[in-house]
Image (cartoon, coloured by chain):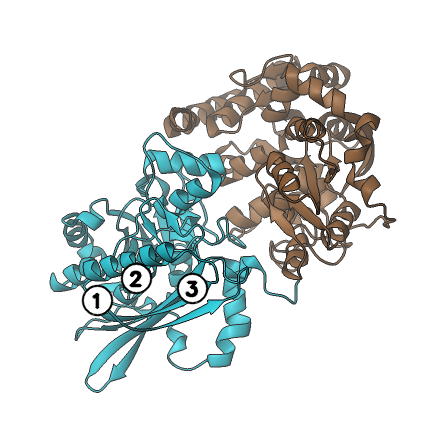
Chain colours: A brown, B cyan
Amino acid sequence: MKYLDEYRNADDVRRYIDAIGQLITRPVNIMEVCGGQTHALVRFGIDELLPDKVTLLHGPGCPVCVTPTETIDRALAIAARAETIFCSYGDMLRVPGSHRDLFSVKASGGDVRIVYSALDALDLAEQNPAREVVFFAVGFETTAPAHAMAVVEARRRRLPNFSLLVAHVLVPPALEVILSDPDRRVDGFLAAGHVCAIMGLDEYSLLVDKYQVPMVVTGFEPLDLVQGILRCVRQLEHGSPSLDNQYARAVRPSGNLAARAVLKEVFQTVDRRWRGLGMIPKSGFALAQPFAEFDAERKFPMKLAEVDDPIECISGQVLTGHRRPNQCPSFGTICTPDKPLGATMVSSEGACAAYYRYKRNEVS
Amino acid sequence: MSNHVELAHGGGGRKMRQLLEHTILPAFDNKHTEARHDAVVLPVGTQRIAFTTDGYVISPMFFPGGDIGKLAVFGTVNDLAAAGAIPKWLSASFIIEEGLPLDVLEKVVHSMREAAATARIDIVTGDTKVVDRGKGDGMYVTTSGLGIVPDGVDVRPARVRDGDSVIVTGDIGRHGVAVLSVRKGLTFESPIESDCAPLADMMQCLIREGIDVHCARDATRGGVAAVLLEIAAAGRVHVEIQETEIPIDPAVAAACELLGIDALHVANEGRMVVFVAESDAKRTLHALRSLEVSRGSAIIGRVTTGGRAGTASIRTRFGPARALDLPAGEPLPRIC
């Protein structure tokens, strides 16, 4: 609890905001990568406290938002089957597929269960040997190690009725898409603290060296964020881009070695389609060959068409920082959390949902 | 999106509002349902009675600080209290699943008897049904309540005025966290218990002091945020609260952060949100704090013209205000 009080201290936050104001000499665009950072910035009103010269652009770090529609459709088809128990984190349940979402499959009789952990799904498989338990493995590198461990444990317990529907995506390839865009608006990045706690800093150092753009790894509390922004602005003012770790209390340069080892064992890197962003090479995980028996795509083969979001949905532009949610013509009118056009409005960490929840009474 | 009723429709959030407004209320619309208050006040001869009903589907049935029986009595008592009524009589309807151990049923009804004695009401009629194993999840309890509204007392959203003070009668979030801790097997250094308690005496104390309570509502499913938004909508006003003034126990706050839920959305079962004229705020606070059940009362905000009518906002500790919203569904299903 002390962490919460200290890292939300209003006086300290204001001191950092003042320091940013005094240091900055020209307008800069800073992108926070992770949906959790976006949410915290908007929830605490930090984006409004910052000097006008700092513009925050919101990044693609919301794994729920970028899960392709056809993957949701696959999940819906599996969940609707009589023999399956489909387990998922809560925030996936309202993400719309082509026609419906998991909540409505549940309401029509599909056995869909919200779990807090993949291990809960594993226990369900053990308790229900006659049913096929499928866990929707969504997330970046942060959640992937726990999912990998669930598979290892499933093998140890010899469970033939457990599988993962893998939809993991990786942060660095998405950053590379944004960095290599000739129309790039982003001057500096706040990198995702919890992803880096797992994977370490190497991949990000490479990106900083290649593109000469400052990157600061931050935590998720207000003080973490304003400290990170100050350090990013300082780099921009002094013209010497580097990778900086503001979240040293949780992030070691080599990351979490045990987690990285289990990822290497259980997953392989594959090309993935991202909702709103299209195909990004080597940007996702799939189960490695030795664990193929736990792959729900193999257990439940089906052909699904690739589906694009309605034309009115500009979530791709939002995810790459080209537009803010309240600049979208559909925002708050035909697109709301209750009838979302795209996943950035549905996911609790999507930029559009954050703006709707905290800012929709304001004029853009 | 769906042609079926979803869990979220029972959550006290936006979807439930939609279900009520689009499907249920239009079937029954009459001048009494227009007030959109938890208990309805009806004229009977020269008196006014308050009438309310509530179903209790909480899972698990037993939790730190209470059980489904205690909840079923106090919850309905509090809905009557929120209308300014003195609760008198409850009915109790039981839908029991085949196979429920008899001693569980005994514990529940015993608990209801104790709660009724504490609240000084009588349970005077009821009904019992048994459904097949697998069809009833243990037990569901529905209580309806009748109370008498003293002369001159008029507590409802339409009476809320610009400038009114908003008071919450104690620290928030206990009930939801207590229930969730049992479900998730979480333990805390100091165990968190539900705040389940009757609030009718508290409300009558304010009335006896001569305080003109404009509006009150107990902050159950959907939490304090739901109450503020419902009253803002029904009263066509804007409510702004201050983050730094909201009373919350550190252990409850920590649990909410851990679970990723907003304490303002968490159910309470012994907390009222009260609207009084600003000139009455100090007196109200003093009266509330003199009672055990409302010792932790605090003024958390006010009704202002500084925002759009029908909405509510919270000024964060850093300065800027942001909108208060209802969650779409329910962060914690089967909470009461």
Quick check: A324 left or right of B233?
right
Q: Classify mark 1: helix, strand or loop.
A: loop
User: Are the residues flagged by discs 2 and 1 in contact, CB closer than 8 Å?
Assistant: yes
Chain label for disc 3:
B
Residue B233 tag number: 3
Residue position marked by numbered label 2 in the rendering: B73
Residue A322 shows in this picture: no
Q: Where is residue B57 in the image (x, y as percent from the top left)?
A: 44, 59
Q: Do labels 3 and 2 share a chain?
A: yes
Q: Do labels 1 and 3 share a chain?
A: yes
Chain label for disc 1:
B
Residue position marked by numbered label 1 in the rendering: B121
The Cα–Cα distance between marks 2 and 1, rounded to whole angstroms, is: 9 Å
Q: Position of residue B148 (x, y in %)?
A: 21, 74
Q: Where is residue B209 in the image (x, y as percent from the top left)?
A: 11, 61
Amino acid type at mark 1: Ile
Q: In which quarter of the view is residue A1 placed?
A: top left
